[in-house]
Image (cartoon, rainbow, N blue to C red):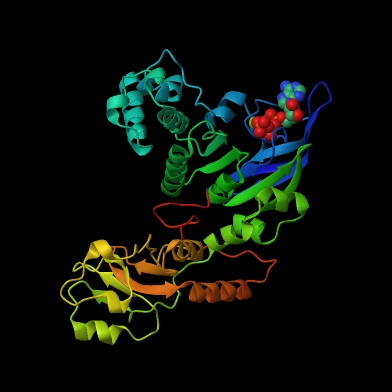
Amino acid sequence: MIRIDSVTKRYPDGTVAVDRLSLDIPDRSITVLVGPSGCGKTTTLRMINRMVEPTEGTILLDGKDVTQQPVNTLRRSMGYVIQNAGLFQHRTILDNIATVPRLLGWGKDRARGRARELMERVGLDAALAKRYPYQLSGGQQQRVGVARALAADPPVLLMDEPFSAVDPVVRKGLQDELLRIQAELGKTIVFVTHDIDEAVKLGTMVAVLRTGGRLAQYAPPAELLSAPADAFVEDFLGADRGIRRLSFFPATDLALLTTPIVAVDATAEQIAARATGETPYLLVTGLDGRPLGWSAPHELTAGSIDPGRLLSHGRPFVPGTDSLRAALDCAVLSPTGWAVAVGADGRVTGVVSQQTIAEAIRGAHAAVPADAPAAAPPSLSKGGPSDAKVAG
Ligand SMILES: Nc1ncnc2c1ncn2[C@@H]1O[C@H](COP(=O)(O)OP(=O)(O)OP(=O)(O)O)[C@@H](O)[C@H]1O
Ligand SMILES: [Mg+2]
């Protein structure tokens, strides 16, 4: 949909902000531009909606040169979101969001109706509609910025470090929300960040730029992590890229053990039958099937198992939706070195050792040549456990 073809931007003072950049930005997905400060990310984004004109090269939108299109028409087909949201301080939240529909000539009621719909879509309480931007938290303002950009339903969203001014917890919420909105609305999003974790979490494709506005690598995140093009990209990805790459392998096929598990009301015979020596510990579950904690078998007395005296079971993982990274994390944090697997309903489905996970990791790497991308199954969250994405 958007093709950047050998584009260079030289500012009047001679600064080359972007140097012969070529990128094909796929439809209906999130493409991330990432790189150190001053590498030309904002300049590139602004050339797409003609806030900055290229010195050389062309940018095509649906095959048409953007410089041949009226700038107003072009900008209305592209929502634009910036850091700190850039809201109109003297307008209410509702009227901020209704700005573009009003410019397009919609009646007040229709525009406000649309704005209310969008508030819900981006997770804003309807009660905030009449407030002014200064009466909102940074994260809420950022949501308003996204809603405003979506108001006229443009096919393209340009986002320049939209989440970088908020704290990590709020930021994670905004990222998850963006992934959800993207899945629902199928917008073509070009997203700028200097945070590689954010890039890997959000991007279908990630363009890593280096200072001087040159493209270092353009690839899906799993491929970046498995095969960085050069030392610059490798350095930019950080020291733990091997661990992060595990986010792209599902935990579905891990061999779970179901023997070393007893219910809290187990009889002495049941405890004895379960203590087979496969594991030094037994996992005790409640009557509802949820995990309570670990114990050495000889410390369990039938009829009087005290959940308060068990070793913590740690955070469980969900094999159907979590990655090998999440499973490994659970095992590493578990006091017994064993991870607990649960179903979507929270009931225990089995336990698995660090060693078994390590074997699965070796198997996953072997199945994917080092220079080929690991395909992320559609159902797999790219982060860690589904309740706490850790890749981003
Ligand atoms: N109007 C301008 N005139 C001259 N140089 C400019 C202008 N705007 C940007 N630059 C320079 O172009 C280069 C790229 O700037 P740009 O804003 O695109 O970087 P960026 O990757 O968005 O950086 P950051 O992560 O800090 O936002 C920088 O060296 C910057 O100083
Ligand atoms: Mg910038």
Of residue 51 and residue 202, the one placed in the foreground of this image is 202
Residue at horizontal 29 percent and vertical 79 percent from the top: 298
- Asked if one can make out residue 30 in the rendered structure from this viewpoint, the answer is no
Ligand 2 visible in quadrant: top right
Residue at horizontal 51 percent and vertical 75 percent from the top: 355
Residue at horizontal 37 percent and vertical 17 percent from the top: 132
- Asked if one can make out residue 258 in the rendered structure from this viewpoint, the answer is yes
- Residue farthest front in this picture: 299
Where in the figure is residue 41, as x and y percent of width and height? 67, 36
Residue at horizontal 46 percent and vertical 43 percent from the top: 172
- Residue farthest right in this picture: 14
Q: Quadrant of residue 270?
A: bottom left
The quadrant of the picture occupied by the N terminus is: top right
Residue 268 in the figure: left or right of residue 160: left
Where in the figure is residue 229, as x and y percent of width and height? 75, 56
Q: Quadrant of residue 312?
A: bottom left
Numbered-mark total: 0
